[in-house]
């Protein structure tokens, strides 16, 4: 008997086992997106840390923010291109990159502060750190995309094998099922032209959805940036400060990046690469932890390098760093955010020139914008017929220190203990807009409708960032609204000799708001010079012999020399400028005289020739300082 021929179709089919994908669909994507969220938040914290610290140390926050942002974005493009060389080793490359970013970003604040304290302000250090951090941040997304692509490709291959081999016979995934479906379609139920057109137009299945992955990565990146941007001012700065906050952020960055690679992509690492990655992360974390422990001693040493050895008080308020230097029992020096705000040896020269010319006339009610140190209030309270003095100060910490520090309280004559003085906390622009600026110690209310005989603007220099608002045409328009009939306003406008353009721009802003001005420029009479041509110029730049190194001022310009003058503008609302002189009942000043004021007026007028003609006013939408 002849057996029938054996063909492949008659052989029994061995049972097929479904091939399971080695990685679950969400096992890679979701942890990677979580790490993208954390790393993006850390990257934005590094960026904001550089901007904030550079603004404090170097000054001119607009310039510093522009430099940091532009350099960092440019460097991110370079980092994306350099990441191409690491795609073949994406796992170990990403792990080492995050360790380096944690070290550079976490230590950037401390390094920048050290360079400022011992080397002086240097824009090159800021640019170098911005460039390094930007390159490292720019390489993150390409490497993470490579890791996700590799994992998703392996998963899709596993799923494809399951569909082609593991489906039972006769089902859509099996070969016989497909043949049956094709047979039915060819013989019994042919496709209609519309169905055939839809099938042709249908895009082929892509086992790796590149567009979806990019969308997910960028979504996590942007949301992480939001979290980092909110955490920096509301959590890190108030609770940890600039130095410790950056170091803690670096530690979180290292843990997130290293943990992802060592846990999820550990099979992609060789034993040598695994040891290298573990050692690098342990080293970085140990270094950041040591720096965190030594942050306070380092900050104290850096302060001594900047301000000298005789630091009496150093506090960080909600708005700024306040440092008082000198010897106990002698007039102290007051520094605000690294700027010499008041030199105890000769601050009276500045405050007498600011206050007494404005008091020539009715002065029963006086409004002081700024002046949280109490020194301008001290001069006002020397007039016995003053009934009320309202001080609008942004920082309660400065007022608290001016009250409680014995040397600073002695310098301001304990002005805040006088019953006639009321302190309102808040921004001067907002207070004026609300209608008068009063509101008591709690800062509530504004005493709407209040009118003052004298408004004294004891504010930061026009070239600082706050000068955009506090020396604008709109600000002076609001100040005119709180002046009584015949009232006067006086403001410091920067050194007229050193910076005539800035000085006369303030004058143009006052005139645009409806004021008639009387300029005067006081010679400091100090051979050492006052200010640096860009700061507030409220005292001797070299201090009072207590040994502080010359600190930079906010808004300092490169190459500016020492200024030896204070420029002021006395103004009255309307068409007639106020007279420049001293009141008949004025207390005897230590540094002012009618003849000296006449000379100051002539000196200010001589600087007009050095300023551009027809200077436009500075406004909120077009600042010109």
Image (cartoon, helix red, strand yellow):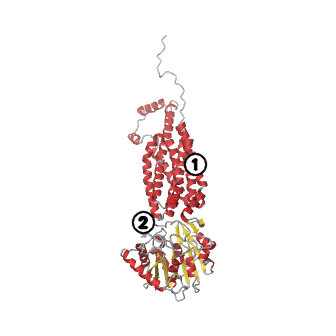
In the picture, the disc for residue 559 is 2
Tell me if residue 623 comes above or below residue 368 in the rendering.
Answer: above
**Residue in front for this viewpoint, 484 or 57:** 57
Residue situated furthest top in the rendering = 1
Marking on residue 285? 1
The reply to whether dot 1 and dot 2 touch (C-beta < 8 Å) is: no
Label 1: how many residues lie within 10 Å, few (<14), some (14-19) or many (20+)? Answer: many
436 lies left or right of 617: right
| Residue nearest the viewer, comparing 197 with 258 | 258
Instruction: Name the one closer to the observer, 174 or 540.
Output: 540
Which residue appears at 55% of the width and 62% of the height? Answer: 305
x and y, in percent, of residue 240 in the image: 59, 58
The x and y percentages for residue 380 are 56, 81
Q: Secondary structure at mark 1?
A: helix
Labels 1 and 2: the sequence-earlier one: 1
The numbered dot on residue 184 is: none
How packed is label 2: few (under 14 Cα within 10 Å), some, or many (20 or more)? few
Count of marks placed on residues:
2
Residue at 51% of width from left, 35% of height from top?
Answer: 158
Residue in view at x 56 percent, y 54 percent: 247
Q: Quadrant of residue 327?
A: bottom right
Give coordinates of residue 504: x percent, y percent: 41, 76
Residue projecting furthest to the left: 613
Residue 160 place in picture, x, y as percent: 49, 35
Side of 117 where 624 appears, left or right: left
Of circles 1 and 2, the one toward us is 2
Q: CA distance from mark 1 to mark 2?
A: 41 Å
């Amino acid at each position: 008997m002849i057996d029938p021929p054996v063909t492949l179709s008659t052989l029994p089919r061995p049972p097929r086992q479904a091939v399971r994908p080695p990685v679950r669909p969400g096992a890679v994507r979701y942890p990677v997106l979580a790490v993208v969220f954390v790393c993006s938040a850390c990257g934005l914290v590094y960026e904001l840390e550089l901007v904030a610290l550079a603004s404090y140390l170097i000054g001119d926050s607009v310039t510093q923010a522009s430099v940091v942002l532009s350099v960092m974005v440019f460097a991110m493009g370079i980092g994306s291109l350099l990441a191409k060389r690491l795609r073949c080793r994406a796992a170990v490359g990403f792990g080492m990159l995050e360790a380096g970013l944690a070290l550079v970003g976490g230590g950037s604040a401390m390094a920048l502060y050290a360079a400022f304290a011992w080397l002086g302000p240097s824009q090159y250090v800021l640019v170098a750190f911005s460039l390094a951090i930007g390159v490292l941040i720019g390489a993150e997304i390409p490497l993470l995309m490579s890791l996700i692509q590799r994992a998703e490709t392996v998963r899709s291959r596993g799923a494809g094998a399951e569909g082609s081999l593991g489906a039972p016979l006769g089902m859509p995934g099996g070969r016989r099922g497909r043949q049956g479906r094709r047979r039915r379609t060819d013989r019994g139920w042919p496709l209609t032209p519309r169905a055939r057109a839809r099938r042709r137009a249908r895009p082929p299945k892509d086992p790796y959805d590149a567009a979806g992955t990019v969308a997910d990565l960028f979504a996590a990146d942007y949301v992480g940036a939001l979290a980092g941007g909110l955490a920096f001012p509301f959590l890190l700065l108030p609770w940890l400060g600039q130095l410790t906050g950056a170091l803690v952020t670096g530690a979180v960055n290292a843990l997130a990046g290293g943990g992802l690679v060592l846990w999820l992509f550990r099979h992609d690492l060789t034993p040598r690469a695994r040891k290298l990655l573990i050692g690098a992360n342990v080293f970085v974390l140990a270094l950041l932890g040591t720096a965190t422990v030594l942050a306070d001693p380092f900050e104290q040493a850096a302060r001594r390098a900047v301000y000298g050895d005789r630091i009496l008080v150093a506090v960080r308020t909600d708005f700024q760093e306040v440092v008082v230097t000198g010897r106990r029992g002698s007039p102290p020096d007051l520094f605000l955010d690294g700027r010499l705000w008041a030199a105890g040896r000769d601050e009276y020269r500045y405050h007498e020139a600011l206050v007494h010319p404005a008091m020539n006339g009715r002065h029963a009610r006086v409004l002081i914008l700024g002046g949280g140190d109490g020194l301008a209030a001290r001069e006002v309270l020397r007039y016995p017929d003053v009934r009320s003095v309202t001080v609008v100060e942004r920082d309660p910490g400065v007022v608290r220190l001016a009250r409680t520090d014995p040397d600073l309280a002695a310098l301001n004559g304990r002005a805040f203990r006088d019953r006639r003085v009321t302190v309102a906390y808040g921004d001067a622009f907002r207070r004026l807009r609300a209608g008068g600026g009063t509101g008591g110690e709690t800062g509530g209310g504004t005493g709407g409708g209040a009118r003052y005989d004298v408004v004294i603007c004891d504010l930061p220099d026009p070239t600082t960032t706050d000068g955009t608002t506090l020396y604008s045409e709109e600000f002076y328009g609001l100040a005119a609204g709180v002046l009584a009939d015949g009232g006067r306003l006086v403001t410091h406008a920067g050194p007229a000799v050193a910076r005539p353009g800035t000085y006369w721009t303030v004058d143009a802003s006052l005139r645009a708001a409806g004021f008639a001005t009387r300029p005067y420029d006081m010679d400091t009479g100090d051979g050492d010079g006052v200010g640096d041509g860009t700061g507030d110029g409220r005292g001797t730049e070299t201090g009072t012999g207590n040994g502080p190194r010359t600190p930079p001022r906010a808004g300092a310009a490169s190459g500016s020399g020492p200024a030896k003058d204070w420029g002021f503008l006395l103004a009255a609302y309307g068409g007639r400028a106020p007279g420049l002189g001293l009141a008949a009942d004025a207390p005897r000043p230590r540094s002012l005289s009618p003849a000296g004021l006449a000379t100051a007026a002539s000196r200010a007028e001589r600087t007009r020739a050095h300023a551009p003609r027809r200077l436009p006013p500075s406004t909120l939408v077009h600042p010109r300082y």
